[in-house]
Image: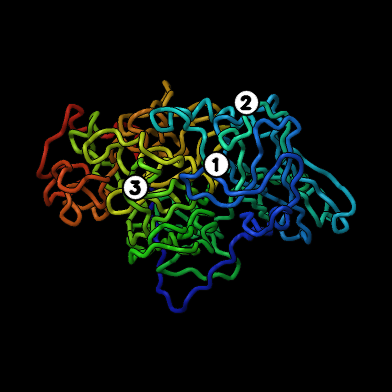
Amino acid sequence: MRRIFLLGILLLPLPLLAREANLIRNPGFESGSAPSGPADYELTGAAAWGKTGNDLETGTRGIFFPGNARDGGSVAQTVHGLVPAKGKWLTFSFRGLAEEGFVLGSEALEMRIEFFAKDGTESRDGAVKAIYREIVADRRDFAANGNHGKGGAAVWRTYAFEEMIPFAEVDTVRLSVAYRDGAASSSGRNAAFQIDHFSLVQRPESRTGRVDPAVVQDKAKAGLPSASPADPATLTPLGGRWYYRAEAGEKIALPLTVTAENADRLLYQSDRLVAPFAGAMESSLRVGWKDRAGNTATEERPVPDNVTITFKGDGFLTLHSKNLPNHPTAQFPEISGNWRGNPSSIQEQDETFRLPLDPKPDPQAKAMTANDGNMALPMGPTGVAVNGVVFFNPFDAGMTDATSFMDRCCGHPNQDNQYHYHKYPICVNTAFVDKGDGHSEVIGFAFDGLPVYGPYEAAGVMAKDLSDNPLNDFNAHYDEARGWHYHVTPGKFPYLLGGYFAKVEKSNVMSGPPGGGGGQGRGREPGAGGGGPPSFGPGGMGPGPGPGPGPGPNGERPPPPPPW
């Protein structure tokens, strides 16, 4: 692949771009009072306001739909002051959790967008999206992604609905989530549908690739195609599949820094140009978590720079992460009465990773054996999700499968208080939504620079089940649009990566155990001190030759065609 890098020096600080604004008031339902409920919202029927999650989770404030309420209920907010000239496309989204006991007698769980003119006094149009079918599909596809292969669909995920403003006079929208025909056997928390975040974003272009019919008509009259790729003049190549789209008048020079403010301008060439880090780079330090100095937070503090990306012209995307998850988690340490689980906490980290912009094939790549006996992947970070949380291999320090000891978002902290994922972290989809209606989006990157995609190859088809163009032992395969890439495989080993298929950037992995403990890599699992497997020596822990154990039964595995 062609490698092009920016030339130039940074003479003046570059202004950050304005991020896409959430037009919702009180989006996290935090403000309000009993019994009236959350400020700026209207609740009807059985809908109730309270703490989300369960008693063992770091929940936020949100809305509950009891699953046994036959007449159901709704939550809604009216947004005034829209100016269609600022963008015709609206994306209404919320984060929701369907507990295993939540059952409806019909598909009547819906998102609604209603359009009004004259400050909400005159109705103009409306649209409805049924979403209960997405819950049913998740239960079919992701049950095995849970602990002990069960309950994997009862997780926080994002539901989204994009619509075009139909008329120029529209200045108000009413957004709602509503349900009816509750058929659950109880009214308890374990039979509820929960909502903990509302969002409305206005854009000049569709995020899902839709086209304004009026634009199609105008282009047809002018003899132009109805849709065209981004104007190349607006894209600055950064190397490999990476580009930056500057705003009008914005000057680009190295080093280029990307934060939450301009993440939607950092583009990756998948089957189309996508912005994988948009909406995922911010987090917060929650009550009970530890800051970098080890102090326990007593109140929540926003962390807008949880992820920062820099391009220096050296062939790498340099990612700095504080590794704070941007979704609900279990409460760590796990203590409930006499029960003791994971003894570690979630703590702010200070990690820097270098991802090759133009991954190169590794003729000596090797995939993991059943217990990683050939040490194809290190203990500790093997890649990073778009929210800055690191991926680990499937094993704990004793080389047993660690994937049945996660919280609902498929993560937990290790002995160094480093939160991480061992398997498909569905909650990372808060940035882009994966409904299983097409090929999944990028959820992160391995330390060899290859992208990690979600589980789907096509509508309703999971990559792990492919017989045509199946995944190899690395969980990777090739297609012409995306090149070589990994897929997560819910419920099927190796879950995330089966080894580094391309040449790994060795600065991301350590050649020995951290801090004198027994685990390998840059992180340790609980109980790893003094008991982990032996490390490679100075040759590092990536694939390829070096001192230490030889390859296992899979041996040395050169990448098969097609070419890179």
Q: CA distance from mark 2 to mark 3?
A: 42 Å
Q: Residue at x 38, y 46 (%)?
A: 335
Q: Amino acid at mark 3?
A: Gly
User: 390 or 64, which lies in front?
Assistant: 64
User: 280 or 136, which lies in front?
Assistant: 136
| Residue position marked by numbered label 2 in the rendering | 185
Q: Residue at x 69, y 24 (%)?
A: 105
Is 49 left, or right, of 336 in this rendering?
A: right
Q: Residue furthest top?
A: 467
Q: Residue at x 51, y 61 (%)?
A: 260
For residue 416, say whether it is visible: yes
Mark 1 neighbour density, 10 Å: few (under 14) some (14–19) many (20 or more)? many
| Residue position marked by numbered label 1 in the rendering | 157
Q: Looking at the rendering, which quadrant does residue 100 occupy?
A: top right
Image coordinates for residue 347, horizontal then vertical, percent:
36, 57
Is 221 left, or right, of 553 in this rendering?
A: right
Of labels 2 and 3, the one closer to you: 2
Secondary structure at numbered mark 3: strand
State the mark number for residue 383. 3
Q: Looking at the rendering, which quadrant does residue 86 occupy?
A: bottom right
Q: Are marks 1 and 3 in contact (CB under 8 Å)?
A: no
Answer with mark 1 or mark 3, whichever residue precedes in sequence.
Answer: 1
Q: Residue at x 46, y 58 (%)?
A: 287
Q: Amino acid at mark 2?
A: Ser
Image coordinates for residue 22, horizontal then vertical, percent:
64, 58
Image coordinates for residue 350, horizontal then vertical, percent:
33, 62
Mark 3 neighbour density, 10 Å: few (under 14) some (14–19) many (20 or more)? many
Q: Residue furthest bottom?
A: 12
Secondary structure at numbered mark 2: loop
Of labels 1 and 3, the one closer to you: 1
